[in-house]
Image (cartoon, rainbow, N blue to C red):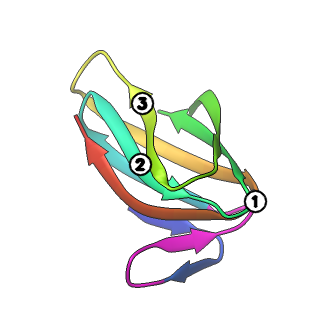
Amino acid sequence: LYLGGKWNIFPEYASAGALGEIVFKYKSKNVYMTAGSKSGAEVEVYLDGRLIKTIIIKSETLYTLIEGTNYNEHTLRLKIKSGTLEAFTFTFG
């Protein structure tokens, strides 16, 4: 897991504003993230370098990032476009 930009690390979560990003390789079909934002955060989701969707993070809840069709190795990149993201954890299915 790689964090790009300026992040603040707390015991339960990491937070970053615009220009922050998260990049990691995974081997799973689905990817979920527990996250929140006090003011709302716009986040672009890239799969293997291709923009697949933009999500708005608001209340602290579980967000579906990837709904895949195979268990091959992929690279996920999240780019924070606006607001402040509070990222708690990732889960896979």
Q: From mark 2 to mark 1, how far is it between C-alphas?
A: 17 Å
Within the image, what quadrant is residue 36 found in? Answer: bottom right
Q: Secondary structure at mark 3?
A: strand
Q: Are marks 3 and 1 in contact (CB under 8 Å)?
A: no
Which label lies toward us, 2 or 3? 2
Expressed as whole percent of the image width and height from the top left, the position of residue 35 reads 49, 56
First in sequence, mark 2 or 3: give its number.
Answer: 2
Rendered-image quadrant of the C terminus: top left
| The residue stretch that appears in magenta | 10-20
Front residue (pair 38, 75): 38
Q: Secondary structure at mark 1?
A: loop
Rendered-image quadrant of the N terminus: bottom left
Residue 83: which numbered mark, if any? 1
Expressed as whole percent of the image width and height from the top left, the position of residue 28 reads 24, 34
| Residue drawn where x is 63% and y is 51% of the image | 58
First in sequence, mark 2 or 1: give its number.
Answer: 2
Within the image, what quadrant is residue 50 found in? Answer: top right
Residue 14 colored magenta? yes
| Residue drawn where x is 42% and y is 30% of the image | 66
